[in-house]
Image (cartoon, coloured by chain):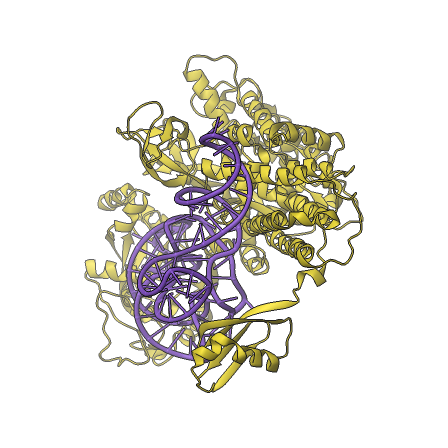
Chain colours: A yellow, B purple
Amino acid sequence: MARYNARESEERWQRAWDARNAFVVSNDSSRPKCYVLEMFPYPSGRIHMGHVRNYTMGDVIARFRRAQGFNVLHPMGWDAFGLPAENAARDNVNAGKNSGINPREWTYANIAAMRSELKALGLAIDWSREFATCDAEYYKHQQKLFLDFHKQDLVYRSEAEVNWDPVDMTVLANEQVIDGRGWRSGAVVERKKLAQWFFRITRYSDDLLAALDRLDKWPEKVRLMQKNWIGRSEGMRFAFDLSNGGKVEVFSTRPDTLFGASFVALSPDHPLTEELAKTDVKLRDFIAECRKTGTAEAEIETAEKLGYDTGLTAAHPFDPNWKLPVMVANFVLMGYGTGAIFGCPAHDQRDLDFARKYKLPVLPVVVPEDADPKDFEIDNEAYVGPGRLANSRFLDGLSVEAAKAEVAKRLEAEGRGTRTVQYRLRDWLASRQRAWGCPIPMIHCGKCGVVPAPASDLPIRLPDDLDFRVKGNPLDVHPTFKHTTCPVCGGKATRETDTLDTFVDSSWYFARFADPTSEDPVNRDAVNYWLPVDQYIGGIEHAILHLLYARFFTRGLHATGWAALDEPFAALFTQGMVLHESYQDETGSWLYPDDVEKRPDGSAVIKGSDRPVTVGPSIRMSKSKKNTVAPMSMIDLYGADAIRWFMLSDSPPERDVDWSEAGAEGCWKFVQRIHRLVFEVEALPPPGAPIGEVSGSALELRRATHRAIAAVTEDLAALRFNRAVAQAYTLTNAIQTHADVGGAVLREALEAIVLLAAPMMPHLAETCWEALGHKTLVVDTPWPKADEALVRTDNVTIAVQINGKRRGEITVALDTPEAETRAAALADEGVRRALEGKTPKRVIVVPNRIVNVVT
RNA sequence: GCGGGCGUGGCGGAAUGGUAGACGCACCGGACUUAAAAUCCGUAGGGCCGCAAGGCCUGUGUGAGUUCAAGUCUCACCGCCCGCACCA
């Protein structure tokens, strides 16, 4: 018998599926819908193992649900705007070969390459719905949405401090600033105020938080991360009167500790600080000093508290004669609350550190219930627990909660302050000084200000002839792009040359898939039919940004009338990474796996030499560590099915998986094993042949078959792919053990293993299905159903414990009454011996499970 | 620092509070073969006793606890991983 030729078979079935548009799905169907989506890829040029794992999981769910009778939408697209394309164009220029490469060509070439790689995986995707976010046909609609959001005041323009790279002349995202320097140029990043476009995500702060509770099919971890990111805290804003006649407003979650205040502190960036600095040289120096502190993690952690006494004083809100010094402090952030605080050292660690350094009073005002207020002292640790108020005049004796309420009541009565809810979440700064992104459809007019571009002008198209020899944004210096007329007054005007953050592109693509040909940004009916996505799958690295933005955007679509829902993803699954061993030569240089040879004694050398190789731990595959394995080379070697199988085996899907050649080899062997089982079998009855009463080995095989059907069905529904794989092995072993029963029972078992493995190894399944005499395709075959009567067993073997230790086992009929089970257990030879004639005090019988004898 | 997660054979990992180690990988023994590969069969947590069948002890990071019964629940500790971070 010939070995299974995976590549040949895979190409054949991929053509067969294509030919009958097997995965093209219609928007109206009487079947229940199921929308399966994996986070779409950035077209970097090559798929990597992470993609393979992600898309294989989604594909298994899509094929499984399809077989179960769902109308399954499983689309694919390209998150195609972004920096790498611009960098490629720029590198091309710098290398002196300005051969006309531009981001568009680079991107579409990558898409073409990656599409063919994804197709080689045999994914059950409706390719008719494919689009790239850099298609004018897509960003045209995004521009329309931008205008709609603008009308609803969900978009605005405002001054903001940004990370400015003075060498590359561009804004950098926070994560592109490494140790205070631009990741590309290495230049020290400047803080710069620029007018930027924002999405008003904070309008939904509370809703985005509250709705997390209802996302019960999301990982707890992700919900928690979003919760912390939104960072809701309840407190008060209130004002202090200053000795210069002014006021300063502070925010506090602990107004109850107001009588423990010993200073008021302003952020170095606070407007009042800047005002004072105009006439205070030393303060100017201090501010400069504060700004020198880097943004690096380690620096913040070890940063010393720095303060500067402005000489001003602030009057205590409840005692005008009580004057507190007004300091400028480096640990007060302008971006949170009001940029000013009152310091209560006894009950806040930062305030305490600050007070100790600058010799300010530390007065405890909250005392734990079990402590004596007279002896309670603060050493070097602030007390943040519950307790009773002390040293606090009219608050004395109250609980923390009651004191907060009392302070709030009094301050509000005096009109000095209000209870507020403060969020950590800030509005989404979405403009980028980049050429390869969605142009922001706004126009700057000298007379009329900033006005929206008319919807009829959309798309505002990116020009192809961008000049990447210039620093900064090529759109700024393009001869025509920028120049236009004002839609209001008709005078000369300029276009906005900022483009949108690529996270905008990925914030609504799932809605576009519902009907990618719609004349409108989205087809309302199609969106309301398909959304929410029933199963979304992607990496944990998007836990906050992408998933939060998409949740916001869906609310925006709702507010602008494009959709009737708020939450885009009903269920979320975050899969683990693909790891690989890492290799270094004696100089520490990284080596590709292909250049390393493993010797039988366990050592490793550089292929074709005796130079030793240090084998490092398994870490995430990355180009810099060279521990990557190209999926296509593995598919060429073992076929897509074996690689898909590998990606689902062993490791639970949410955990990292370690890629190894040996593992892939093992999967290939299993592919062959199933192929052999089906092709070596002799003379089976035709499909659909009836199965009569069976017993013995045949009954065993039927039971194994139906148990596997039940188990795999359950495991796939719960995304426990690794267990489904194990069940498939178990059934395969059973088939091999009982193969000699032949006939309709063996046919039933073989058909079951083929159908159960089909979502994971779809090509092999088609080959085997055909060999089993079927004229139809597996993709058109319904999911098998388990016969409950066969899943249950007649007899159960249960353990008998004596005082919790296993001392024997008995086999009884299923659902044997308790008394009988007890008798059988006590009659067991081993149990009697172990009891040594002792009389049991108690016998616990858990039917069908266990017997525990207590002496 | 705060928040969250995880610790089970040589390895990846199974296990509604009920026979720990399913299934796979690797290893070892055997069959087939001139030989190798491939394939098939078999043993296997550790320790002790036994020619053997089998039996006993021990065992899920450490220590306590709850329970007839704990990998699973509770508390404390140790280790590793992830997220956030001067958020008032």
Q: Is residue A397 above or below residue A525?
A: below
Seen from the viewer's position, the closer of residues B12 and A383 is B12
Q: Residue A177: where, in percent of width, then height?
A: 37, 37
Q: Is residue B34 shown left or right of residue A765?
A: left
Q: Residue B58: where, in percent of width, then height?
A: 35, 67
Q: Residue A73: where, in percent of width, then height?
A: 69, 42
Q: Residue A291: where, in percent of width, then height?
A: 29, 42
Seen from the viewer's position, the closer of residues A625 and A255 is A625
Q: Which part of the image, by quadrant, shows the C terminus of chain A?
A: bottom left
Seen from the viewer's position, the closer of residues A652 and A319 is A652
Q: Is residue A824 above or below residue A426?
A: below
Seen from the viewer's position, the closer of residues A241 and A373 is A373
Across the whole image, how many numbered discs are drawn on residues? 0
In percent of the image, x 24 and y 59: which residue is there? Answer: A353
In percent of the image, x 36 and y 73: which residue is there? Answer: A386
Q: Which part of the image, by quadrant, shows the N terminus of chain A?
A: top right
Q: Is residue A839 visible?
A: yes
Q: Is residue A149 visible?
A: no
Q: Is residue A641 shown left or right of residue A310?
A: right
